[in-house]
Image: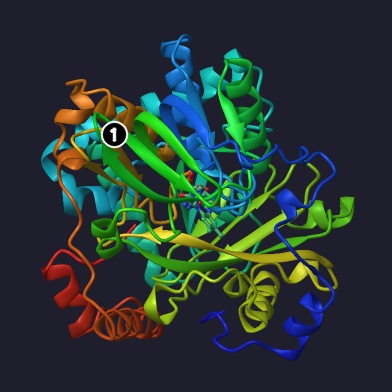
Amino acid sequence: MSAWLEEPTQRGAAMVADAVRAPYWLDRPERPAARPGLGTDTDTDTDLLIVGGGFTGLWTAVQAAEENPDRRILLVEGARIADGASGRNGGFCSASLTHGLANGVARYRDELPTLLRFGVETLDDIEAALERLGVDAAAERVGELDIANFDWQVDDVREHVTEALLYDQPATFYGRDEARARVNSPMVAAAAHDPNVMMVDPAKLAWGLAAAAERLGVRIVENTEIVSLRRRRGSIRARTAAGTITAGRVVVATAATRPLLRRNRWAMVPVWDYVLMTEPLTAEQRAAIGWSGREGLADSGSRFHYFRLTVDDRILFGGWDAVYHYGSDHDPRHAYDDAEFALLAEHLLQMFPQLDGIGISHVWGGAIDTCSRFSAFWDTSMGGRVVSVLGFTGLGVGAAHFGARTALDLVDGRDTERTRSAMVRSRPIPFPPEPLRWIGITITRKEFARSDRRKGRRGLWLRAMDAVGLGFDS
Ligand SMILES: Cc1cc2nc3c(=O)[nH]c(=O)nc-3n(C[C@H](O)[C@H](O)[C@H](O)COP(=O)(O)OP(=O)(O)OC[C@H]3O[C@@H](n4cnc5c(N)ncnc54)[C@H](O)[C@@H]3O)c2cc1C
């Protein structure tokens, strides 16, 4: 096989035609009932207000409540818990805080050993917290296999392993035969194993963290949007449609939605990513594809897929195109794009021709909070009383725990190894205003596609982006 198909086919379109248009993870009977909103409860007062009920907000709530059981903590979610990226993702919970080693080397070379240590500690902390809090997130610490699909990608994957070992990170290179013994696909030319990745059921993780936070005394309200934050006489006034919450401190964890603080709007763009979920594989289908290690899989082009097995042996298959809509439009209708789904379905069969005839049960998309350094940043405002954390750029399942831990350090004015790090103290380069923003992102998307067609060679545009620190290589 020499390339991924670039255009959707009729076969792909037929495969997804009857799929449920909703995130599989959220479309299950285990989904808890909605918690009541704040309604007309206008005089709410709290020590710590957390805005956003995804992983970042939930880990903030759990960690804050664990360290100080007397603190009054209110988490306000505009929609439902995990309705944002946290209930829509692939469930790859990686130790990487920098969106991969290569991006870490390019941006944080001097402190990378520290960031790598923080990352492994984070993954260990998550595992320990799930145990301690009794959260069943179907976690499997099976690692990730990064796959070279084509011969021209093999050297890159091998070099990635060499670089990881240089930084004392565990990694193993598998040539074609060994890699295909792990995953039986004509699209596997080599692979690298990273053991520091845990596969989780993201919705169960979020629902479990919300329940654990409540057991620790946190109050959670859903369907209540915070529309503005103002500083007023030593506290923060957060306005909802119905009234005002007075808070001593605020952590804002709203990811790809329009940031409450104007200056963060320059630093983040919502980029849409698409996913499909198959029906559970039959025993014959399961045997035909190998993959007995159940690792998370990702391939290595500029546009890449990520795919994994669920506990009931469905395949989640997502990625490839990343779509930006003019004006940072975050309208939920962008979560459904038939052409993207049809192309993903065709790619699934390119990867596993053995699965011809498989049913697709769900299709959906989600917005990724993308920043120009492809890894989280923290913003402190309103006299240190408000801290926002965002910009995870598609690798936030694990990093959200670190993002939350650090946001709490900052909002409580603690001087820690985390808050002293250059990563936490610096900010990404802002995006330009429209129409330059749309033009720049569109050219970059087209150049990524061209680079894949030219066996990874990066043209002038991508090399210029690399030179000014806006390039990406995970
Ligand atoms: C399709 C897809 C696949 C992904 N796959 C992976 C993966 O496999 N591994 C990985 O590490 N990362 C992945 N990611 C990224 C990961 O899901 C996110 O980085 C992570 O979930 C971010 O968590 P969060 O809490 O910061 O944001 P979110 O989960 O988006 O939560 C933010 C919440 O804030 C709420 N909110 C927004 N504004 C307001 C307001 N004004 N008032 C009240 N509430 C508000 C929203 O409703 C939302 O629930 C993926 C993302 C997508 C979209």
**216 up-or-down from 40: above or below:** above
Which sits in the foreground, 141 or 69?
69
Figure quadrant of the C terminus: bottom left
Which sits in the foreground, 225 or 156?
225
Q: Secondary structure at mark 1?
A: helix
Query: At which x and y percent is residue 388?
Result: 32, 43
Which sits in the foreground, 326 or 94?
326
**367 up-or-down from 83: above or below:** below
Q: Which residue is mark 1?
A: 116
Residue 143 in sight: no
Q: Residue at x 61, y 46 (%)?
A: 82
Query: At which x and y percent is residue 372?
Result: 26, 62
Within the image, what quadrant is residue 71 found in?
A: top left
Query: At which x and y percent is residue 310?
Result: 72, 46
What amino acid is labelled 1 in the image?
Answer: Leu
Query: At which x and y percent is residue 292?
Result: 70, 43
Q: Is residue 69 left or right of residue 41?
A: left
Mark 1, other Cα within 10 Å: few <14 / some 14–19 / many ≥20: many
